[in-house]
Image (cartoon, rainbow, N blue to C red):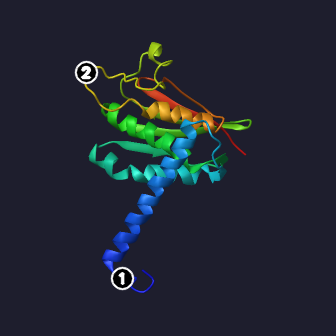
Amino acid sequence: LEENPDDKVIQLIKSSSDSLLQVIDKATILSKVAFDEEIEKENLNLNSLMNQVIEEFTSILERKDMSLEYQPSEVITIEANSIVSEIFKNYISNAIKYAQDGKRIIVEHEQKDDYVTIMVKDFGMTIPEEEYANIFERSVQLSKNEKRGQGLGLAIVKRIAEAHNAEVGVKPNTPKGNIFYLKIPCN
Protein backbone atom coordinates (compact mmCIF):
# COMPACT_ATOMS: atom_id res chain seq x y z
CA LEU A 1 0.00 0.00 0.00
CA GLU A 2 2.94 2.32 0.72
CA GLU A 3 4.39 1.57 -2.73
CA ASN A 4 1.04 1.73 -4.57
CA PRO A 5 -1.36 3.91 -2.54
CA ASP A 6 -3.84 4.29 -5.44
CA ASP A 7 -4.13 0.58 -6.22
CA LYS A 8 -7.78 -0.33 -5.56
CA VAL A 9 -7.08 -4.05 -5.18
CA ILE A 10 -4.40 -3.42 -2.56
CA GLN A 11 -6.75 -1.00 -0.75
CA LEU A 12 -9.47 -3.68 -0.73
CA ILE A 13 -7.06 -6.31 0.61
CA LYS A 14 -5.92 -3.91 3.35
CA SER A 15 -9.50 -3.00 4.27
CA SER A 16 -10.57 -6.65 4.35
CA SER A 17 -7.56 -7.59 6.47
CA ASP A 18 -8.32 -4.79 8.94
CA SER A 19 -11.96 -5.92 9.16
CA LEU A 20 -10.92 -9.52 9.76
CA LEU A 21 -8.50 -8.46 12.51
CA GLN A 22 -11.32 -6.51 14.17
CA VAL A 23 -13.56 -9.59 14.07
CA ILE A 24 -10.82 -11.71 15.62
CA ASP A 25 -10.20 -9.07 18.29
CA LYS A 26 -13.92 -8.86 19.14
CA ALA A 27 -14.20 -12.66 19.27
CA THR A 28 -11.26 -12.80 21.67
CA ILE A 29 -12.79 -10.16 23.93
CA LEU A 30 -16.22 -11.84 23.81
CA SER A 31 -14.67 -15.17 24.80
CA LYS A 32 -13.06 -13.45 27.81
CA VAL A 33 -16.44 -11.92 28.69
CA ALA A 34 -18.13 -15.32 28.36
CA PHE A 35 -15.66 -16.88 30.80
CA ASP A 36 -15.78 -13.96 33.26
CA GLU A 37 -12.15 -13.07 32.58
CA GLU A 38 -10.85 -9.54 33.06
CA ILE A 39 -10.87 -7.42 29.89
CA GLU A 40 -8.69 -4.42 29.12
CA LYS A 41 -10.36 -1.06 29.59
CA GLU A 42 -9.46 2.48 28.63
CA ASN A 43 -11.05 5.91 28.93
CA LEU A 44 -13.63 6.28 26.16
CA ASN A 45 -15.55 9.39 25.17
CA LEU A 46 -19.21 8.36 25.31
CA ASN A 47 -20.30 10.87 22.66
CA SER A 48 -17.65 9.69 20.18
CA LEU A 49 -18.54 6.07 20.85
CA MET A 50 -22.27 6.70 20.31
CA ASN A 51 -21.66 8.70 17.13
CA GLN A 52 -19.61 5.82 15.70
CA VAL A 53 -22.35 3.31 16.56
CA ILE A 54 -25.12 5.47 15.13
CA GLU A 55 -23.15 6.05 11.93
CA GLU A 56 -23.22 2.30 11.24
CA PHE A 57 -27.03 2.36 11.16
CA THR A 58 -27.54 5.42 8.95
CA SER A 59 -28.29 3.57 5.70
CA ILE A 60 -30.53 0.89 7.22
CA LEU A 61 -32.53 3.56 9.07
CA GLU A 62 -33.05 5.40 5.79
CA ARG A 63 -34.14 2.19 4.03
CA LYS A 64 -36.61 1.42 6.83
CA ASP A 65 -37.89 5.03 6.84
CA MET A 66 -36.94 5.43 10.50
CA SER A 67 -35.22 8.25 12.37
CA LEU A 68 -32.69 8.10 15.16
CA GLU A 69 -32.29 11.11 17.45
CA TYR A 70 -29.18 11.64 19.55
CA GLN A 71 -28.12 14.93 21.08
CA PRO A 72 -24.59 14.68 22.45
CA SER A 73 -24.03 16.95 25.39
CA GLU A 74 -21.10 17.45 27.72
CA VAL A 75 -18.13 15.14 27.42
CA ILE A 76 -18.68 12.01 29.48
CA THR A 77 -15.82 9.57 29.90
CA ILE A 78 -16.33 5.91 30.77
CA GLU A 79 -13.66 3.39 31.58
CA ALA A 80 -14.57 0.58 29.24
CA ASN A 81 -13.46 -1.75 26.52
CA SER A 82 -14.64 -0.76 23.05
CA ILE A 83 -16.68 -3.99 23.06
CA VAL A 84 -19.23 -2.00 25.12
CA SER A 85 -20.38 -0.51 21.81
CA GLU A 86 -21.90 -3.91 21.01
CA ILE A 87 -24.54 -3.22 23.67
CA PHE A 88 -25.74 -0.14 21.84
CA LYS A 89 -25.50 -1.86 18.46
CA ASN A 90 -27.71 -4.63 19.79
CA TYR A 91 -30.24 -2.22 21.28
CA ILE A 92 -30.48 -0.15 18.09
CA SER A 93 -30.57 -3.20 15.85
CA ASN A 94 -33.41 -4.70 17.91
CA ALA A 95 -35.32 -1.41 17.81
CA ILE A 96 -35.03 -1.39 14.03
CA LYS A 97 -36.02 -5.05 13.78
CA TYR A 98 -38.84 -5.23 16.33
CA ALA A 99 -40.13 -1.65 16.66
CA GLN A 100 -40.03 -0.48 13.06
CA ASP A 101 -43.70 0.55 13.18
CA GLY A 102 -42.77 3.19 15.79
CA LYS A 103 -40.70 4.93 13.09
CA ARG A 104 -38.17 6.46 15.47
CA ILE A 105 -35.51 5.74 18.03
CA ILE A 106 -34.18 8.16 20.62
CA VAL A 107 -30.80 7.69 22.30
CA GLU A 108 -30.32 9.70 25.49
CA HIS A 109 -28.02 9.66 28.46
CA GLU A 110 -28.40 10.87 32.00
CA GLN A 111 -25.54 11.32 34.45
CA LYS A 112 -26.06 10.96 38.19
CA ASP A 113 -23.24 10.76 40.71
CA ASP A 114 -20.58 8.35 39.39
CA TYR A 115 -22.84 6.66 36.81
CA VAL A 116 -24.22 7.45 33.40
CA THR A 117 -27.33 5.73 32.07
CA ILE A 118 -27.58 5.43 28.30
CA MET A 119 -31.13 4.78 27.09
CA VAL A 120 -32.27 3.55 23.69
CA LYS A 121 -35.98 4.34 23.37
CA ASP A 122 -38.24 2.81 20.76
CA PHE A 123 -41.92 3.41 20.04
CA GLY A 124 -43.02 -0.07 18.95
CA MET A 125 -45.01 -2.65 20.89
CA THR A 126 -44.34 -2.51 24.63
CA ILE A 127 -42.82 -5.69 26.04
CA PRO A 128 -45.01 -7.09 28.84
CA GLU A 129 -43.51 -6.42 32.27
CA GLU A 130 -43.56 -10.13 33.18
CA GLU A 131 -41.02 -10.74 30.37
CA TYR A 132 -38.44 -8.29 31.78
CA ALA A 133 -36.79 -10.84 34.08
CA ASN A 134 -36.21 -13.28 31.19
CA ILE A 135 -35.34 -10.98 28.33
CA PHE A 136 -31.59 -10.93 29.03
CA GLU A 137 -31.36 -14.73 29.39
CA ARG A 138 -29.82 -16.98 26.76
CA SER A 139 -32.16 -18.43 24.10
CA VAL A 140 -35.17 -16.37 25.18
CA GLN A 141 -37.14 -14.84 22.32
CA LEU A 142 -40.31 -12.90 22.79
CA SER A 143 -41.54 -13.33 19.22
CA LYS A 144 -43.26 -16.70 19.22
CA ASN A 145 -44.65 -16.45 15.68
CA GLU A 146 -41.39 -16.67 13.78
CA LYS A 147 -37.79 -17.60 14.43
CA ARG A 148 -35.76 -14.39 14.16
CA GLY A 149 -32.40 -15.29 15.65
CA GLN A 150 -30.59 -17.35 18.21
CA GLY A 151 -31.75 -15.48 21.29
CA LEU A 152 -28.14 -14.77 22.26
CA GLY A 153 -27.99 -11.02 21.66
CA LEU A 154 -29.32 -9.70 24.96
CA ALA A 155 -27.62 -12.47 26.94
CA ILE A 156 -24.29 -11.32 25.50
CA VAL A 157 -25.25 -7.70 26.22
CA LYS A 158 -25.75 -8.67 29.87
CA ARG A 159 -22.35 -10.39 30.04
CA ILE A 160 -20.58 -7.39 28.49
CA ALA A 161 -22.29 -5.11 31.03
CA GLU A 162 -21.26 -7.36 33.92
CA ALA A 163 -17.64 -7.25 32.69
CA HIS A 164 -17.88 -3.45 33.12
CA ASN A 165 -19.55 -3.50 36.56
CA ALA A 166 -22.59 -2.12 34.79
CA GLU A 167 -26.30 -2.88 34.73
CA VAL A 168 -28.65 -3.46 31.80
CA GLY A 169 -32.41 -3.51 31.77
CA VAL A 170 -35.63 -2.62 30.04
CA LYS A 171 -38.62 -0.57 31.07
CA PRO A 172 -41.72 0.69 29.27
CA ASN A 173 -41.60 3.86 27.17
CA THR A 174 -44.46 6.38 27.10
CA PRO A 175 -46.89 6.33 25.33
CA LYS A 176 -45.70 2.95 23.97
CA GLY A 177 -42.50 1.13 23.28
CA ASN A 178 -39.48 0.20 25.33
CA ILE A 179 -36.42 1.77 26.89
CA PHE A 180 -33.37 -0.46 26.92
CA TYR A 181 -30.62 0.95 29.09
CA LEU A 182 -27.06 0.55 30.27
CA LYS A 183 -26.03 2.06 33.61
CA ILE A 184 -22.24 2.23 33.72
CA PRO A 185 -19.71 3.94 35.98
CA CYS A 186 -18.23 7.15 34.56
CA ASN A 187 -15.20 9.23 35.38
Question: Mark number for residue 145?
Answer: 2
Dot 1 amino acid type? Asp
CB atoms of marks 2 and 1 within 8 Å: no
Point 73% across, 38% down: residue: 114
Residue receiving disc 1? 6
Dot 2 amino acid type? Asn
Measuring from the top left, give residue 117's x and y in whole percent: 61, 35
Measuring from the top left, give residue 34's x and y in whole percent: 54, 36
Horizontal side of 48 relative to 139 (left or right) equals right
Measuring from the top left, give residue 153's x and y in whole percent: 43, 34
- Above or below: residue 163 compared with residue 49: above
Residue at mark 2 to residue at mark 1: CA–CA distance:
50 Å
Q: Callout 2 environment at 10 Å: few (<14), some (14 to 19), or many (20+)?
A: few
Disc 1, SS: loop
Measuring from the top left, give residue 60's x and y in whole percent: 32, 48
Residue 118 visible in the displayed image: no
Q: Callout 1 environment at 10 Å: few (<14), some (14 to 19), or many (20+)?
A: few
Point 47% across, 57% down: residue: 22
Q: Nearer the viewer, residue 41 or 100?
A: 41
Horizontal side of 170 relative to 9 (left or right) equals right
